């Protein structure tokens, strides 16, 4: 009787050990997948940060006063008003 109990306990322990090993394998695999995803997201973040920097540089180039004034003169035929054409309105 004692021998049967010991054998059944040993069988339960072996099954528990096997399940634990499978769980460990699954957790490590999942961990690797998450780490790969993290690296991909970090690369994507770096690329987006680089693009953002380039866009800010481009925006500062497009917004330069000289460029805006040149476009206003050439494309829109705008001119600066003469001093006598300027009217100052005070509150």
Image (cartoon, rainbow, N blue to C red):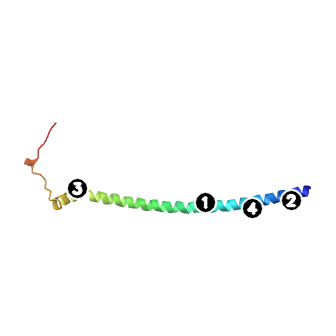
Q: Element type at marker 2?
A: helix
> Which picture quadrant has residue 3?
bottom right
Residue beneath label 1, please?
Answer: 31
For the residues labelled 4 and 1, the Cα–Cα distance comes to 20 Å
Which label number is shown at residue 7? 2
Q: Is residue 57 left or right of residue 46?
A: left
Q: Are marks 1 and 2 in contact (CB under 8 Å)?
A: no
Which label number is shown at residue 47? none
Which label number is shown at residue 65? 3
Q: Furthest-left residue in view?
A: 84
Q: Disc 1 vs disc 3: which is toward the camera?
A: 1
For the residues labelled 1 and 3, the Cα–Cα distance comes to 53 Å
The x and y percentages for residue 60 are: 29, 57
Counting residues from the start of the chain, the first of labels 2 and 3 encountered is: 2
Answer few, some or many: residues within 10 Å of disc 4's Cα (few below 14, many 20 plus, some between 14 and 19): few
Q: Element type at marker 3?
A: helix
Answer few, some or many: residues within 10 Å of disc 3's Cα (few below 14, many 20 plus, some between 14 and 19): few
For the residues labelled 3 and 4, the Cα–Cα distance comes to 73 Å
Q: Residue at x 84, y 58 (%)?
A: 8
Which label number is shown at residue 18? 4
Q: Element type at marker 1?
A: helix
The x and y percentages for residue 30 are: 61, 61
């Amino acid at each position: 009787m004692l021998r049967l109990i010991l054998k059944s306990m040993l069988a339960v322990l072996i099954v528990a050990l096997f399940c634990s090993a499978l769980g460990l394998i699954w957790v490590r695999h999942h961990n690797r997948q998450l780490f790969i995803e993290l690296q991909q997201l970090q690369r994507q973040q770096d690329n987006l940060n680089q693009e953002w920097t380039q866009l800010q540089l481009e925006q500062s180039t497009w917004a330069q006063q000289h460029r805006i004034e040149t476009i206003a003169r050439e494309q829109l035929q705008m001119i600066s008003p003469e001093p006598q054409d300027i009217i100052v309105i005070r509150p």
